[in-house]
Amino acid sequence: MKIESATQEDLPQIVEIYNQAISAGQNTADTEVLSVEDRQPWFDSHNEKQYPLLVAKEADIILGYLTISSYRYGRKALRHTAEISYYIHFDHHRKGVASQLMESAINSCSALNLKTLVAILIGCNDASVKLLEKKGFKEWGRMLDIVELDNGNFDHLYYGLHLDT
């Protein structure tokens, strides 16, 4: 497996992975599948120098992806903080893909001039909670019962990590 920056050609596979999470119903707050065209502006908002979109690949198959995105865009006091998100193809869960993506992202933060990472997730996503805690993230906030999905209401969790820079 290799970790690299996503290219335009990767977008269809990235969207497929994200749509798996939407269909699962508890991994994202999006509730309707998206097209490649729907995700193009999101894709365009990422770049290697400030907010990378990383993919884990074997051959030309994307196993998962991770984004570092602006947190509260345009607010200068938060310029050294970013949001981290990741999604793994269902066929590649429990193979260390998310761990490797996370390690690569955390290692890149110094060069990106980032001091803090924030992950925002749905409270029933136990696998993500375990991964974040394994990587040193701590629960920093919880918004009770605000995520409304077909199978119930869930908390919205905020996990954070102060980086050694």
Image (cartoon, helix red, strand yellow):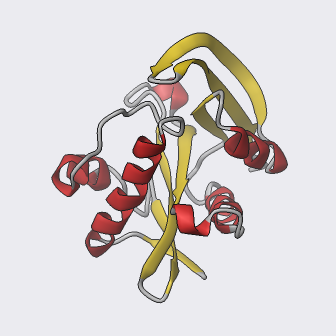
72 displayed left or right of 31: right
Residue placed at 65% from the left, 27% from the top? 123
Number of labelled discs?
0
Q: Is residue 99 above or below residue 133?
A: below
Q: Residue furthest front?
A: 151
Image quadrant in which the N terminus is located: bottom right
99 displayed left or right of 155: right
- Residue toward you, 14 or 91: 91
- Residue toward you, 46 or 134: 134
76 displayed left or right of 118: left
Residue placed at 33% from the left, 57% from the top? 15
Q: Position of residue 36 (x, y in %)?
A: 21, 56
Q: Is residue 156 above or below residue 106?
A: above
Residue 105 location, quadrant: bottom right
Q: Is residue 142 above or below residue 129?
A: above
Q: Residue furthest left?
A: 37
Q: Position of residue 47 (x, y in %)?
A: 37, 59
Residue placed at 53% from the left, 35% from the top? 26
Q: Position of residue 108 (x, y in %)?
A: 61, 62
- Residue toward you, 164 or 11: 11
Residue placed at 29% from the left, 37% from the top? 32
- Residue toward you, 83 or 111: 83
Q: Position of residue 29 (x, y in %)?
A: 44, 30
